[in-house]
Amino acid sequence: PAAAAAAAAATARARPRTTTTTTTTPTAVTTTTTTAARRGALQLRRASNTGNIFVDGWMDISDVVSGGGSSLGVSELAENIGKDCYVDINGWHLFLKDMKFHIPLARIVSQRVATDGKRFKEDAITQILKDCPVKVAGNKGATLPLFDLMPKRCVEDFLKIAEEYANDL
């Protein structure tokens, strides 16, 4: 009897308990799945509001698979920025990917190029670097523009990467 109770308890622990709750509102469908092994929530946000959750869900999936149209090539742009551009601090090269700046900069460059009619404008891209603040000196609150921390060659590389991105669109 004690062995049977122990086996039943082990089986109950091995089988995750799952509870699924679905909530529908005019702006979103939220499905929450709770499992003993995995606690989390999956949320599906509808991009459009056609009133048909199946159509809206299909549009969300097609948007993700196609890259959303506006973010076309942003991951490649981010990769190129992250591996080729760096900040020079007292002879140390701190790459933008290590600073976690490459993805936000790629998104900003992508938006700026799209705003400028899919054309490269050197002044606009340079202004992005001048407007990007970098915290230095820890908690002292000092910030410097990214443009000032990058060597001239890296700024030129950044501009070349942005120009190639714009030409590929």
Image: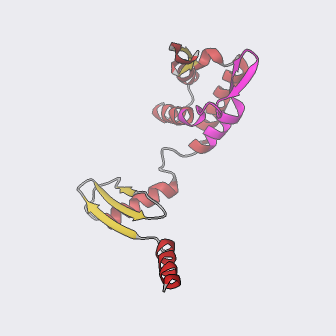
Examine the rendered structure and indicate whether residue 19 appears above or below residue 105.
below
Percent across and percent down for residue 137 are 58, 15
The quadrant in which the C terminus is found is: top right
The residue positioned 32% from the left and 54% from the top of the image is 48
> Residues in magenta?
76-104
Q: Is residue 85 left or right of residue 104?
A: right
Tell me if I can see residue 46 in this picture: yes
Tell me if I can see residue 123 in this picture: no
The residue positioned 52% from the left and 33% from the top of the image is 113
Q: How is the image coloured?
A: secondary structure
Percent across and percent down for residue 90 are 73, 14
Q: Is residue 136 left or right of residue 25?
A: right
The residue positioned 24% from the left and 57% from the top of the image is 25
Percent across and percent down for residue 65 are 51, 58
Q: Quadrant of residue 155?
A: top right
Examine the rendered structure and indicate whether residue 3 appears above or below residue 28.
below
